[in-house]
Amino acid sequence: MKCPVCAKGDIKTGKIKEEMFGVYLGEFPAQICSKCNESFTDEETTRKIEDAAKAKGIWGLGKKTKITKTGNSLAIRIPKEIADFLNLKEGKDAYIHPDKNKLVIESP
């Protein structure tokens, strides 16, 4: 079967390493394209990946937030769940920088 994404590679059975928000979730069976490496999982495997993310406390960490203005700067509120996960505390130093179209906040 040809890959539905690139239409060039063949789909083969293999294993993928899954990660979410930089946290390793494990290896799971998948169908993988020999050309573009796109992977496809069945419903049961997808549920196992979701369960692994829930067990590690990272399921649902992605959140929408509003950008507001404070003085001449812009401010972004960090949801409590993300602050807790990253161990961010009021008054703690952080390093902020762009990475292509992303904003990265690093906590030393």
Image (cartoon, rainbow, N blue to C red):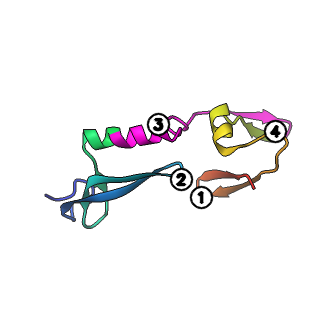
Spatial distance from mark 2 to mark 3, Cα to Cα?
A: 14 Å
Tell me the quarter of the picture where residue 15 sits.
Answer: bottom left
* Other-residue count near label 2 (Cα within 10 Å), few / some / many at <14 / 14–19 / ≥20: few
The residue beneath circle 2 is 22
Q: Are marks 1 and 2 in contact (CB under 8 Å)?
A: no
* Nearer the camera: disc 1 or disc 3: 3
Spatial distance from mark 1 to mark 3, Cα to Cα?
A: 29 Å
Q: Residue at x 51, y 41 (%)?
A: 56
Q: Secondary structure at mark 2?
A: loop
Residue 14 shown left or right of residue 94 in the figure? left
Tell me the quarter of the picture where residue 73 sits.
Answer: top right
Looking at the rendered structure, the kind of residue marked 4 is Glu
- N-terminal of the pair, mark 2 or mark 3, is 2
**Quarter of the picture holding the N terminus:** bottom left
The residue beneath circle 3 is 54
Q: Are marks 2 and 3 in contact (CB under 8 Å)?
A: no
Looking at the rendered structure, the kind of residue marked 3 is Lys
Looking at the rendered structure, the kind of residue marked 2 is Gly
- N-terminal of the pair, mark 1 or mark 2, is 2
- N-terminal of the pair, mark 4 or mark 3, is 3
Residue 65, image x and y in percent? 63, 33
- N-terminal of the pair, mark 1 or mark 4, is 4
Spatial distance from mark 1 to mark 2, Cα to Cα?
A: 18 Å
Circle number at residue 100 = 1
The magenta segment? 48-72
The residue beneath circle 4 is 90
Depth check, front residue: 84 or 8: 84
Circle number at residue 34 = none
Spatial distance from mark 2 to mark 4, Cα to Cα?
A: 23 Å
